[in-house]
Image (cartoon, rainbow, N blue to C red):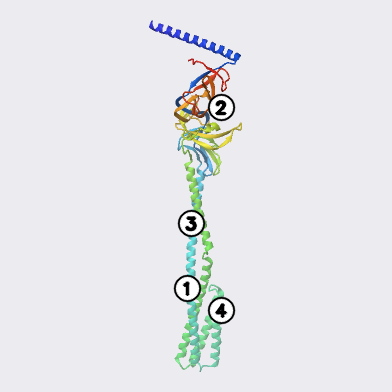
Amino acid sequence: MDGKMEKKKKKRKKIVIILVAVIVIALIIGAVSCSRAAGSAAYVTTTKATRGEIQESISTSGLVESEIKKVYFARVGGAIASVNVSAGELVKAGELLMDYELSDMEELKYQASLQQRRSDAVYQEALVGNSDSQSKLNEANHNLGIIEQQIAADKETLQGLQRDLDSAQRGTSNALVGENYNLSVSANDLTENIKSLDPASQEYADKTKQLNDLQKQIQYNQYRQSVTASSDNVASLQQKISDVQENLALLEESKARMESQKTTSENTVMDGYMRTQYEVDNELAHISYKDTVADYDLASEGIRAEFEGIVTECSVIEGATVMEGTQLLTLESSENVKITFSASKRDIEKLSVGQKVDITISGRSYEGEVSKINRMAQANQSGTPMVGAEVHIQNPDDNIILGLDAKLYIYTNHAEDILMVPVEAVNADRDGDFLYVVEDGVIVRKPIICGISSDNYVEIKEGITEEDEIVISALTDIEEGRNVVVMPDVE
């Protein structure tokens, strides 16, 4: 019973409120009609400024994008064996995206290895040969100096012996003396001639035999002279001369061999340019092998995802042969996501990096903050300058799809314990913002300085007090100085 009585009381109360409202509206309509007819006071609704807090915000929309974008290019040239992903696919960090056909690369690596081994062998052979040639050249130069000194000494000795022999053989017949002299001259000339001949030539052998024959004839004549000589000294001198001449012949042969060795060695010793060529060729072979091995190792690794993300582009197919530097695919992070949007001149004044943002994507809510504001404006399609900005999503998940629209509610400025009025009370003209207030039943225009604002309230920094009666609406046009009637507030 008590419940039914309570319902009846509430019903009667609602009827009374409705009747009162109807009466007030009727009175207002009548008053407005009379006012228009007679030019009397305007009817307005007023309020007073209050103290409270305002959270200023911006509502806008943007596009879901990744903050990290990686474009993969072919690190080496070769055939693609398999492509394991396609555009729009979610991949994990370290996942194999595509790999190379390695058989051809293995063959290239083997060939490069052989080329390197061959180059090492050629280089080492050249070094050993050059060392041998240099050793023989040094030997020839050293021996030639000694041989030439010995030849000069033996020639001087021979001349002395011949002078001594001439003195000992003064009693010998002029015929034998003359003959031996001529034979000695011929032998000396022949000896000089042999020096210029190649020891390996036939002419050298013939001349040597001829020289031996002359020496035998000289020895024979000397023997004949010794028969008539009265002293054993003649025979001794002749033997000494023969020994010296024989030694000179041997020295000349040695000299000829050393000169030939010197010439051959000089032609085979590497000069600086040839040595540099061998070194460069060998170094190039090593570099080629290292590069081939490095390419093979890179190809063996394949193309792997560096982070978890979404493949947004795949521009190569299985079996294709690519060159080094060819674009293969694009991967965008799904863990580092942002919203890009454009802000107007009015909104950009309120934005700052670090402001909190409520984000809605496909009906799901996320948290974020303003992470970037561009320093350059660009005109949109209608020619209005707009500034690009970004919001970082702090709690992304697998439900986020790149490229979708997102709704943003950006918390900009916030203030507490401030003087504020309803948004509809604020007016503006070329002179700035102002309020209409009622003083002694008359409209007064009061300039104001506004602060931050929300959808419902505006901060008033200067111009009014909490005691002012502020006009928030009127049934007719109002202006400063007009008499007004304040209508009762019906709730």
Do labels 3 and 4 touch, CB within 8 Å? no
Which comes before the other along the chain, label 3 or label 4?
3
Can you give x and y, in whole percent of width and height, for residue 45 in the image?
A: 52, 18
Can you give x and y, in whole percent of width and height, for residue 87 in the image?
A: 53, 33
Q: Please tell me whether mark 1 sits on a helix, a strand or a loop.
A: helix
Q: Nearer the viewer, residue 84 or 248?
A: 84
Q: Residues within 10 Å of mark 2 (few under 14, many from 20)?
A: few
Q: Nearer the viewer, residue 19 or 379?
A: 19
Q: Which residue is mark 3?
A: 120
Q: Is residue 319 above or below residue 28?
A: below
The image quarter in which residue 176 lies: bottom right
Q: Is residue 225 above or below residue 257?
A: below
Q: Which residue is mark 4?
A: 193
Q: Which residue is mark 2?
A: 428
Q: Which residue is mark 1?
A: 142
Q: Nearer the viewer, mark 1 or mark 4?
A: 1
Q: Residue at x 47, y 62 (%)?
A: 128
Q: CA distance from mark 1 to mark 4?
A: 24 Å
Do labels 4 and 2 touch, CB within 8 Å? no
Can you give x and y, in whole percent of width and height, for residue 369 in the image?
A: 47, 33
Which comes before the other along the chain, label 1 or label 4?
1
Residue type (three-letter) at the residue carrying disc 1: His
Which comes before the other along the chain, label 2 or label 3?
3
Residue type (three-letter) at the residue carrying disc 2: Ala
Do labels 1 and 4 touch, CB within 8 Å? no
Q: Is residue 11 above or below residue 58?
A: above
Q: CA distance from mark 3 to mark 4?
A: 48 Å
Can you give x and y, in whole percent of width and height, for residue 149 in the image?
A: 48, 79
